[in-house]
Amino acid sequence: MWKTVFRREILHNIYSLRFVLSLVLVLIVFVAGSLSFVRHHAVDLGKYREARDLAARSLETDAQRNATVMAVTPRPYDFRPRDNAFLADAKEKYLPNSISYSAWNVFGFENKSGSANPFLARYDELSWAFVISLLVSFIALIFTFDAVSGEKENKTLALSLANPVSRGALLFGKYVSAVVSVLFIVVPAFLVGLLILTLSGAASWTMALAGEIAAVLAAAALLTAATCAFGLLCSVLSGRSNISLLLALSFWLLFAIVIPNSSGFLAKSVSPIEKAESVEKRIEQAFDDLDKAAPPGSWMQHSGNPFLPQHELRANLQRKRLAAESAIRNDYFQTMFRQFEKTRRLTAFSPVAAFEFLSDAIVGGGYSRFRRIWDDLRVYQGQFQAFFVALDAKDPKSPHWLNPNEDVSTTREKVSPNIVPKFEERAMLFQDRFFSALPFLGILAAAAVLVFFLDFLIFVRYDIR
């Protein structure tokens, strides 16, 4: 019998004014988001290529001076703008997008957000995931808030149950019809957006991209199912549609606005971290302690005489200073990462936040991408250092006193930039994306099932008079 209810409700929804207005609104926003991506992505790619070419020329210039200058000079690795960012921007424009490294260390990342922890900044582009998380979740509540209470006010609920249909079948039919009605809005918007991206040449069609689009659409269906279940909950909790609407708006504000944007507050309250100024003071103190304990002559330098005995003392001191600074900074970075991860776990019980994290995992962007590049670049740095040490060991004119900051006591021979190891971002594998997405997938599925089950328990005792 639920199929009969489904057919009746789906026709009622499609021919309603709320469906038409919702479809027009979502189409407009999807078109605007797609056009914005086409325009900004081309500009961002141009800036990235300029920065990449500048870094390549800098490496070539340093290598032609000598291998040591090439090895000790900090240089940036800039993240390439993702071609699938129209699906989910993953806040990447405001996350760290450049990591500084040399052959001796991965120094840190650029923080352009101005907050204590850049991973907790909240900014959004008009990506499809953002539109779904904010607008489509609201539309799902609009389609369900009066599904039961509205019928009770119109005196049609008792009439519906006078037919040979159980309360469970009636509620399930309404629930499925609402989910499908919202998807009838989302799918055309996806198709129009894809048409714009295809005609503009901004999207290069691959099997991977098609899979990502299908996965984001499936995630949108899960979010729709969860929010429709919450909308029905608002409807069965009251016998008046205006009260149900107020409850639905409260749910939406809590799950779509308050919780996803509370990461900074939660971080400071639940998992505070050391301030950057304090970290710098600890590094300065460590430097002072090392300088005081260093043998006399450790700061002596004579660039014209690489074999000056004091250069060995200087190299040893520089390595100790680098090790001390790296230990302090890496500990600080790890506390930042743990703070973000803990805060994300706390906010993920919101279906909207869970959907955003799920979308980030699907497209392989955001924090997961940053951590992958960060960890891989640290591995590459070890390879780069081993390459330089081997190069220095072959030079009989070098005293081989490894100094991580200066070209004083290691090889001064030129090196071809073509043989220098290059770092390339590693694509996120399907299994990595799946396991990153799995917790948030589970949260959305559990929310849809458990909340609908609660709807059913309340509805079987609902007063239809």
Image (cartoon, rainbow, N blue to C red):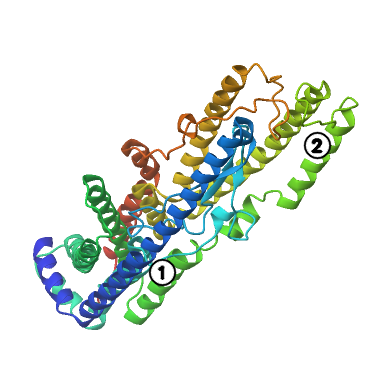
267 or 304, which lies in front? 304
Measured as percent of width and height from the top left, residue 266 is found at 59, 57
Task: Say whether residue 454 is visible.
Answer: yes
Measured as percent of width and height from the top left, residue 264 is found at 59, 59
Which image quadrant for residue 145?
bottom left
Q: Check the image and report above or below for 32 versus 389.
A: below
**Amino acid at dot 1:** Trp
78 or 367, which lies in front? 78
**Amino acid at dot 2:** Ala
Q: Residues within 10 Å of mark 1 (few under 14, many from 20)?
A: many
Q: In the picture, which quadrant includes the C terminus? A: bottom left
Task: Say whether residue 146 is visible.
Answer: no
> Which residue occupies 40% across, 63% down?
43
Q: Earlier in the sequence, mark 2 or mark 1?
A: 1
Which image quadrant for residue 202?
bottom left
* Residue on which the image places disc 1: 252
Measured as percent of width and height from the top left, residue 140 is found at 29, 68
* Residue on which the image places disc 2: 286
